[in-house]
Image (tube, coloured by chain):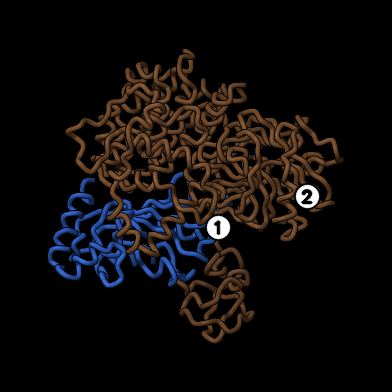
Chain colours: A brown, B blue
Amino acid sequence: MGSCLCKEKKRRRRRWSDEQQQQQSADDQADPCDSRRPVSSISGRLIIDHELPLPTRTARTAAVPCPLTIDHLVLETLSVIRTLVENEQEPPASMIKLHVIADKEEGWLALVTSMVRVIPLEDPLGPAVITLLLDDCPLPTRESVLRLALLFNLSAERSEEGRRFPMQQRNICVVLGCIAEKMAGPNSIAILTKGTLDYLITNLLAFQKEDMNPSVILFSLVALEKFAQTTENKMTIQRYLKEYETNPLLGLEQWIGNPDYVKRQVGFCAQWCLDNLFLVEGRPFSFNCVDLSNINVMLNTKDVSEYLKISPNGLEARCDAFSFESVRCTFQVDEGIWYYEAEIVTPGVMQIGWATRDSTFLNHEGYGIGDDEFSLAYDGCRQLFWHNARCEAQSRQCWRPGDILGCLLDLEKPEICFYVNGQPLGSSTHVTSNNNVFKSARSGFFAAASFMSFQQCKFNFGSSAFKYPPVDRKFKSFNEHAHLDAEDKKILPRHIRLEQLRKLSVRDDSCTLCFDDYASVQLTPCGHRGFCGNCAKQLAECPMCRATIKEKQPCERFRSATQE
Amino acid sequence: MCSLPRRIIKETQRLMQEPVPGISAVPDDNNARYFHVIVTGPEDSPFEGGLFKLELFLPEDYPMSAPKVRFITKIYHPNIDRLGRICLDILKDKWSPALQIRTVLLSIQALLSAPNPDDPLANDVAELWKVNEAEAIRNAKEWTRRYAMDN
């Protein structure tokens, strides 16, 4: 399960809507105070300076457990979340309790401040868990969010003072990003006060002094990006950035390819922002500058779920969305032995491997590569192989930034092998023989990967030398055999792409469902027309009258002028 | 992003050119499948005068499956729960690919005019709606005033 996190949530939502009554009564019975544990049992784990003010006693209502209890639940959620891999697994009790607590305004505030206090900087799933917990809580009211802003008390000074507490600062930025995204619109505008903006931009500027933890800079940048989803905020941020002689993002962009993997993420995000959101006059778009002469295979911008960010050279990808984002490469292989490598930039959940065209990207349901019968992937964070949404554990350490995942597809045998830094992962052949991806497909494979929130990696399809080429068999690299036209190599910024798409016109004899193909099918017995063969194939009943379809007959082209 | 299906482009163009009265649906700058929606509370309903924000998302297999729609503004309504999820047949088993974003939003607006406490999603609300409609309507008006009028 791609992102078990996303999936867990979606599944639970389904249950809510299907069995609303039961859930409702369960909610009513669950008493958040049940979760109280002796404080002593957790004190050892809370080696944290309480720099952030706790909600005051008078502000808390009786229903909200004490902050230490909430801290404990948050840490428990963080520690069990990576074990959630089964589709039918219940969400952890700690998470359910937190949701009950966050249902009330005071509880929500207590949860947010707790996450800021205790989510450790180094946990690879930390920011994703903040996102997940906030995403599953009822949306806060405008008042709650404004109260939170007061509690954070953000300003340029706070950014300066906060440098001693990078963990809290990073978490504050993650929280701001989540709220900006979830409350896009007037509420997002209300939170982006001068203080918030001063705080975030001062965080960015600190890169010059080297006294700021790069994670804080990274998530400040991500927060700004999410605020900019609301157009008015985007303009406010633009105006603010223009006041600087040199736009701070231009400085951060220099961190692309930095040997420090966090700085490298900052560089990636800064470049993405400069190309997509906060354009700077006189700066050419990256896709116009990058040298692609040696690159014949890329991540396919036409075969990717909607939020994944792809670098201008088409080889590096990053997800900053809630969803589980997936992509395939441009080159398809049908026979022979093939190998590629992925350099791990972030140590969180990614599922990297092989997929055919039939593998679907259900990013919002949390399904990705390895979650259907047409794909097989390795997730080195949770150390699991994935095929057909089933996983198999690998006894290895969690992968680390800089690790190289090698992916070998041998269609002669057939088998798929994975390597971390040249070391073969034991039971991959076991997985392939048991859950056989080759039963579903013997050809038509692509390199493919899925990314949880805030994850990034860089692919090498052979345009540079492989770090750990397999020695036990002769393989081919995509780059030697593929070809891309110059036009197809352009990774266009989103606004340019969307603009191009919107200009598209539609013929009036197109299918009334997809507008892609000619309307050429008539349904019987109801007689309705206006559908193409491909759409008709997917219909069980008539879209117009819901009559059961007996036959789908070819007919003359249907003009839709009368349709609307 | 995936190449955007023509169907979505076409619907978006039409929503922009001929907006539905009382409903605004604007695609997100970064994601053409995600719409920011505002529905005005219908006249002669307890929601009159309110502006209700919703989010609408077109899944990968749209229009073969229904859009995912959710209220973001809190609302007191027997068919809408506290997380904003909507109980409406055309969003579930009665979906048809011939329906569109605009027809979906019109149906939701109609649901505000005609709450259906016999097919509830928010149980406590539905219960009150059945046993004491006057009080339920007072609550709905109060929530509208409190949550849907601040902007």
Label 2 sits on residue: A415
**Label 2 element class:** strand
Q: Quadrant of residue A155?
A: top left
Q: Nearer the viewer, residue A164 or A463?
A: A164
Which disc is residue B5 wearing? 1
Label 2 CA crowd tier, 10 Å (few <14, some 14–19, many 20+): some
In the image, which is nearer the foreground, mark 1 or mark 2?
Answer: 2
Against A404, residue A559 (above or below) is: below
Q: Residue at x 85, y 38 (%)?
A: A472
Q: Position of residue A401 (x, y in %)?
A: 61, 29
Q: Amino acid at mark 2?
A: Glu
Q: Residues under labels 1 and 2: Cα distance?
A: 35 Å
Q: Residue at x 42, y 62 (%)?
A: B101
Query: As drawn, is A64 to the left or to the right of A267?
Result: left
Query: As drawn, is A94 to the left or to the right of A375?
Result: left
Label 1 CA crowd tier, 10 Å (few <14, some 14–19, many 20+): some
Q: Report whether mark 1 lies on the same chain as mark 2.
A: no
Q: Quadrant of residue A27?
A: bottom left
Q: Amino acid at mark 1?
A: Pro
Q: Nearer the viewer, residue A354 or A58?
A: A58
Query: As drawn, is A406 to the left or to the right of A283?
Result: right
Q: Position of residue A465 (x, y in %)?
A: 78, 30
**Label 1 element class:** loop
Q: Position of residue A344 (x, y in %)?
A: 63, 33
Which disc is residue A111 wearing? none
Mark 1 falls within which chain? B
